Image (cartoon, grey):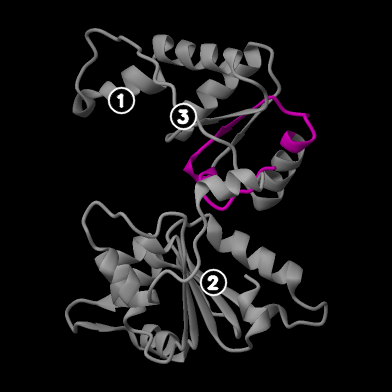
């Protein structure tokens, strides 16, 4: 978000994760001079078409709707926006190798600055790393996990697999996911046991909000201080939850995929 402040031209930050749209705009505005025009930062997201004068955060899924397949061309406003960009940033740039994102990035002929950011630039299972490098060039800065550990920026992770047997579970297409995950007493009890074992605070990631709400009830009933954060949770509340985690005022946060990217918890 600091790049548009340092280099005064028209920037587009292309993101895969929708929750990053408002987050990046807020971070830009926090760093902008107090007299900056609020219209300098804008978004193309969830049907909103509000390009900023200096920075526009673009949801690649939303922008894909501007492609007119019958004409094999962008809509007039889509083409005008892409032509006007002088700098692009690919957030989680390993995703830029997809056909949809590739079409967008290849349609920015005037973007002199092209920067990709990712913790996993290379190693795609479909062997399309060359497409990512075609968008942004070779990797010019990288740091190993071992170096980050030495700096105290990350901790060594440990993966523990727990087996949960649930006989007679119906197939997914016949409601198996709801029976074996969301409403499963056996599985949810296994999650609670892991929460009980591990140091606090801890995070519990879920995919469906129904499952998150159910787990929140169970965790609170077990006596822990807990909150649930998902895609529609306002950024102000998310920030407050992070603050409470960091000062030790929360034991457990149940979170959706919205917290898997773009969230820094010390």
- Please tell me which residue is depicted at 26% across the width and 24% down the height of the picture: 175
In whole angstroms, how far apart are the C-alphas of marks 3 and 2? Answer: 29 Å
In whole angstroms, how far apart are the C-alphas of marks 3 and 1? Answer: 12 Å
- Please tell me which residue is depicted at 54% across the width and 81% down the height of the picture: 11
- Residue 124 seen in this snapshot: yes
Considering the image in quadrants, where does the N terminus appear? Answer: bottom right
Secondary structure of residue under mark 3: helix
The image's mark for residue 177 is 1
Considering the image in quadrants, where does the C terminus appear? Answer: top right
State which mark lies toward you, 3 or 2: 2
Residue denoted by label 2: 43
State which mark lies toward you, 3 or 1: 1
- Please tell me which residue is depicted at 46% across the width and 27% down the height of the picture: 211
Upstream in the sequence, badge 3 or badge 1?
Answer: 1
- Residue 101 seen in this snapshot: no
The image quarter containing residue 98 is: bottom left
Q: Position of residue 253 (x, y in %)?
A: 62, 31
- Please tell me which residue is depicted at 53% across the width and 45% down the height of the picture: 146
Q: Is the residue marked by circle 2 packed among few (<14), some (14-19), or many (20+) residues within 10 Å?
A: many
Residue extent of the magenta highlight: 245-266
Give the vertical position of 83 relative to 47 (above or below): below
Q: Is the residue marked by circle 1 packed among few (<14), some (14-19), or many (20+) residues within 10 Å?
A: some
The image quarter containing residue 103 is: bottom left
Q: Position of residue 43 (x, y in %)?
A: 54, 71
In whole angstroms, how far apart are the C-alphas of marks 2 and 1? Answer: 35 Å
Residue denoted by label 3: 210
Give the vertical position of 180 relative to 129 (above or below): above
Secondary structure of residue under mark 1: helix
Upstream in the sequence, badge 2 or badge 1?
Answer: 2
């Amino acid at each position: 978000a600091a790049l548009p402040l340092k280099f005064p031209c028209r920037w587009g930050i292309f993101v895969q994760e929708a929750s990053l749209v408002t987050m990046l705009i807020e971070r830009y505005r926090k760093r902008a001079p107090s007299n900056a025009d609020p219209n300098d930062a804008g978004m193309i997201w969830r049907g909103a078409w509000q390009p900023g004068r200096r920075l526009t955060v673009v949801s690649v899924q939303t922008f894909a709707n501007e492609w007119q397949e019958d004409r094999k061309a962008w809509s007039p406003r889509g083409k005008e926006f892409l032509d006007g960009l002088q700098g692009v940033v690919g957030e989680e740039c390993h995703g830029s190798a997809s056909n949809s994102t590739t079409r967008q990035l290849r349609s920015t002929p005037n973007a002199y600055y092209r920067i990709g950011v990712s913790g996993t630039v290379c190693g795609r299972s479909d062997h399309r790393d060359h497409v990512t490098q075609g968008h942004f060039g070779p990797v010019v800065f990288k740091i190993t996990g071992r170096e980050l550990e030495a700096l105290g920026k990350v901790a060594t992770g440990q993966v523990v697999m727990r087996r949960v047997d649930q006989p007679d579970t119906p197939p997914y297409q016949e409601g198996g996911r709801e029976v074996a995950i969301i409403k499963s007493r056996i599985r949810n009890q296994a999650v609670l046991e892991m929460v009980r074992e591990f140091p606090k605070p801890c995070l519990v990631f879920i995919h469906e909000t129904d499952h998150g709400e159910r787990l929140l009830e169970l965790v609170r009933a077990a006596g822990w201080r807990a909150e649930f954060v998902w895609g529609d949770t306002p950024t102000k509340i998310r920030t407050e939850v992070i603050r409470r985690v960091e000062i030790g005022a929360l034991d457990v946060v149940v979170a959706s995929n919205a917290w898997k990217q773009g969230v820094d918890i010390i």
